[in-house]
Image (cartoon, rainbow, N blue to C red):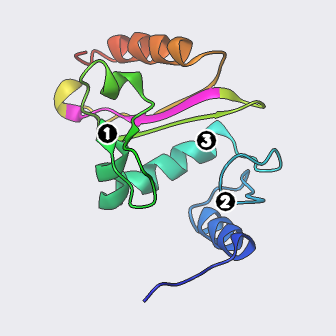
Amino acid sequence: NNILITPDAFSAEMNNIAKQLGMTRTFFKEPTGLETKNVSSAVDLGKLLSAAYRAPNITKYSTQKILSVQAASTPNKNTNALIRDMGQTPLLSKTGFIKESGFNLLYVPDPKNCQNKHYGIVLLGFSTPVERTQQALKLLKFLNCTI
């Protein structure tokens, strides 16, 4: 059965989940992430990253180089150059862009590539996707992760 849900109801559920996760500085006005009234903090996004890491469907789909979606006529390429162009295989990845915070990245590298240490990376506020990728590479190097 298909379940239809309104954007307002979806946003309300997102806010409920954010509250359950202890995301005290987050509010979702609408579900796409593009509305300027959606707000969060780096700390809260770290909490979201931790929860998403425990969701197998999110980790599976967020790390594929190309993903075909039933509603799309052509496959979508992953917007994370670490995956798409550099062959990285993280456990979780989510890129984003909005005018207010620039190009952003939530990323969980595979511990096997990081001396068996677990890291969650939240990068916010970059001017370009290239700048975001360069900063991620610097951070991964700093954490002694193989690239």
Residue bearing the label numbered 3: 43
Q: Which residues are magenta?
A: 103-111
- Give how far across and how far down residue 100 sits, in percent: 78, 31
Q: What whole-number distance in Å separates the C-alpha atoms at marks 3 and 2?
A: 20 Å
Q: Of label 3 and label 2, which has the lower sequence position? A: 2
Closest to the camera, between mark 1 and mark 2, is: 1
Q: Of label 3 and label 1, which has the lower sequence position? A: 3
Residue bearing the label numbered 1: 66
Q: Is residue 68 magenta?
A: no
Q: Position of 50 compared to 34: left or right?
A: left
Among all residues in the image, which is located at the extreme front? 73
- Give how far across and how far down residue 73 sits, in percent: 42, 51
Tag 2: Cα neighbours inside 10 Å, few (<14), some, or many (≥20)?
Answer: some
Question: Given the image, on which type of amino acid does mark 3 rest?
Answer: Val
Dominant secondary-structure state across the stretch colored magenta: strand
Task: Please indicate, yes or no, whether residue 115 appears anywhere in the rendered image.
Answer: no
Answer with the quarter of the image where residue 52 lies: bottom left
Answer with the quarter of the image where residue 118 lies: top left
- Give how far across and how far down residue 19 sits, in percent: 65, 66
Question: Given the image, on which type of amino acid does mark 2 rest?
Answer: Pro
**Viewer-side residue, 109 vs 79:** 79
**Viewer-side residue, 5 vs 134:** 5
Q: Position of 57 compared to 44: left or right?
A: left
Q: Of label 1 and label 2, which has the lower sequence position? A: 2
The answer to whether 61 is drawn above or below residue 83 in the figure is below
Residue bearing the label numbered 2: 31
Q: Is residue 110 magenta?
A: yes
SS class, disc 1: strand
SS class, disc 2: loop
Question: Given the image, on which type of amino acid does mark 1 rest?
Answer: Ile
Do the residues bearing badges 3 and 2 touch, measured as CB atoms within 8 Å? Answer: no
Q: What whole-number distance in Å separates the C-alpha atoms at marks 1 and 2?
A: 23 Å
